[in-house]
């Protein structure tokens, strides 16, 4: 398996623009997580899905952020409109069912909002 | 707010020494504890998990858990320059074991 795949790897955009980050989890993993990492706040869980259903989005910072998982092999995280304070590395991770907890992170998307 | 505290470091140890990394957490209900290693510019990689009080050994790594003291540690024996990275402590939420709360990480430098 190729592991968790994220695209794009780098994104530079201007304030106010819409940004869409994409993730393909490891096949067979039931859980998908979106994290954000900054120097100031460290690694924060934004939202996670179980079997394509959003379970907890309490970490989503504002209504400008939204996430979807239309099927087991694809998820998006959208920011609209983007702001400079959204600049961070966004990681997608997937894992098996809780009984076999082992979370694999994707390579991340480095987002810069000018 | 669930708190997971780590000393940011850097922690510098000579090659071959034991590196000791520490983590405290605030949620007494937490049941699962993990250590991740993150190389600069890379994604976190799970290296150890521990669920019960005591020690768990895996090769050169030993995780230690003391739930009464709300304390988790990671020992790296025979440290190698390739161990130089940031080590993140992660703790599951007591009310939701699928939610992880991460510490800010401790940067480890192993000097040849």
Image (cartoon, coloured by chain):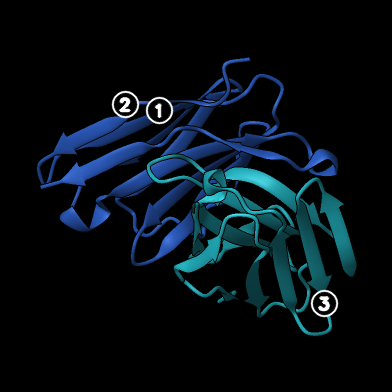
Chain colours: A blue, B cyan
> Which residue is more in the foreground, A112 or B103?
B103
On the question of residue B22 being in view, the answer is: yes
Q: Secondary structure at mark 3?
A: loop
Percent x, y of residue A31: 66, 37
**Disc 1 marks which residue?**
A22
Q: Secondary structure at mark 2?
A: loop
Residue reaching furthest to the top: A1
Q: CA distance from mark 1 to mark 3?
A: 38 Å
Disc 1: CA contacts within 10 A as few (<14), some (14-19) or many (>=20): many
Query: Please, is residue A3 above or below residue A111 in the view?
Result: above
Q: CA distance from mark 2 to mark 1?
A: 7 Å
Which is in the foreground here, disc 2 or disc 3?
3
- The chain holding disc 3 is B
Percent x, y of residue A109: 35, 36
> Which residue is more in the foreground, A45 or B34?
B34
Disc 2: CA contacts within 10 A as few (<14), some (14-19) or many (>=20): some
Percent x, y of residue A70: 52, 25
Which is in the foreground here, disc 2 or disc 1?
2
**Disc 3 marks which residue?**
B67
**Disc 2 marks which residue?**
A8
């Amino acid at each position: 398996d190729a592991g968790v795949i994220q695209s794009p790897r780098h994104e530079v955009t201007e304030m106010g623009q819409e940004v869409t980050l994409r993730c393909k989890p490891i096949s067979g993993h039931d859980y998908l997580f979106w994290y954000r990492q900054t120097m100031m706040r460290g690694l924060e869980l934004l939202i996670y899905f179980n079997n394509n259903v959003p379970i907890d989005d309490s970490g989503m910072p504002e209504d400008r952020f939204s996430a979807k998982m239309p099927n087991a092999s694809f998820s998006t995280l959208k920011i609209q409109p983007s702001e400079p304070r959204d600049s961070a590395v966004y990681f997608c991770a997937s894992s098996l069912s809780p009984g076999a907890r082992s979370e694999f992170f994707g390579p991340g998307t480095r987002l810069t909002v000018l | 707010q669930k708190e997971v505290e780590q000393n940011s470091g850097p922690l510098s140890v000579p090659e071959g020494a034991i590196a000791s990394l520490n983590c405290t957490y605030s949620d007494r209900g937490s049941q699962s504890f993990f250590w991740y290693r993150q190389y600069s510019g890379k994604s976190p990689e799970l290296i150890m998990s521990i669920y019960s009080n005591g020690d768990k050994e895996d090769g050169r790594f030993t995780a230690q858990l003391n739930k009464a003291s709300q304390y988790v540690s990671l020992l790296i024996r025979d440290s190698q320059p390739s161990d130089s990275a940031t080590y993140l402590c992660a703790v599951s939420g007591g009310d939701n074991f699928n939610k992880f709360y991460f510490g800010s990480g401790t940067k480890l430098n192993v000097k040849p």
